Amino acid sequence: MCQRTRRTGYPARILHDARQPTKPMTRRHPPPSPSQSSQPTQGSAAGTRMLRILLVRDPHDADPLNVETIRGGLVSTGFTDIQTVDADLRLPDVIAASQPDLIIIASESAARDTVEHVCVSTQHAPRPIVLFTDNDDAQRIKTALSAGITAYIVDGLRAERVKTVLDVAYARFQLDQQLRAELDATRLKLAERKVVERAKGLLMQARGISEDEAYKRLRSMAMERGLKIVDAAQRVIDVMG
């Protein structure tokens, strides 16, 4: 039987036909289609899915063209999940049922009742709220922003600007929520620290022990009972405080 041998010292390799020179392999990526590149999704205004938008109109407005201009701007930039409703007593139920990602208010006068109605309806589940209006009264702007409006747009109702306005409003809302979460976390830590300090003080006074020893006892109690130290500290306060 004929056995093939290979000279030692030469690693095995793939040989190419010398008559057909090899070309470097390249991976071709098809260019994104316009619909893919411009789809408004959660993360930009937006990510992974199309935004649900609730367009709230002021029933007292005389000009319905404002709502149509906004809707036209949304549709032209790729938004398709758009629901239009009046700012009336049914609004809280509509918001709860539709769970919109973003709310737009169209109100010529930035009516306080309309703004408050929307903001109150979303206070337990905050969402970015954009108000398009013709009212540039400084006090009205301050009141709206204090109530929870994310972006107050005056004389900016042009279809080609709608998506840009929403992108900025969405980014601002996310930043605001992040800052609120960080502030809440800081406040919670301070509150927990006060509880632990008070429990240590009670143990030190009752047992005549040092601060370090009091903390060790709290930690041991927490470990034995599967509790957080702050929960163990609260139990000490409940019993000894």
Image: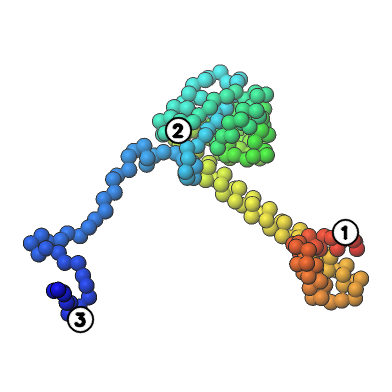
Q: Position of residue 196 (x, y in %)?
A: 79, 64
Q: CA distance from mark 2 to mark 1?
A: 55 Å
Label 2 residue SS: loop
Q: CA distance from mark 1 to mark 3?
A: 81 Å
Does 37 sit above or below residue 194?
Answer: above
According to the picture, the residue beneath numbered tag 3 turns out to be 8
> Which residue shows up at 91% across the image and 63% down it?
240
Number of numbered discs: 3
Q: Position of residue 226 (x, y in %)?
A: 75, 62
Look at discs 2 and 1 and give the one toward the viewer.
1
Label 3 residue SS: loop
Q: Amino acid at mark 1?
A: Asp
Within 10 Å of disc 2 (Cα), the crowding (few <14, some 14-19, many 20+) is many
Give whichever of discs 3 and 2 has the lower sequence position.
3
Q: Amino acid at mark 3?
A: Thr
Does 220 sit left or right of 127 as displayed?
right
According to the picture, the residue beneath numbered tag 2 turns out to be 79
Does 124 sit left or right of 104 as displayed?
right
Q: CA distance from mark 3 to mark 2?
A: 66 Å
Coloured how?
A: rainbow
Label 1 residue SS: helix
According to the picture, the residue beneath numbered tag 1 turns out to be 238
Does 190 sit left or right of 88 as displayed?
right
Residue that sits furthest to the bottom in the current view: 9
> Which residue shows up at 45% across the image and 37% down it?
163
Quadrant holding the N terminus: bottom left
The answer, for residue 154, to whether it is visible in the render is no
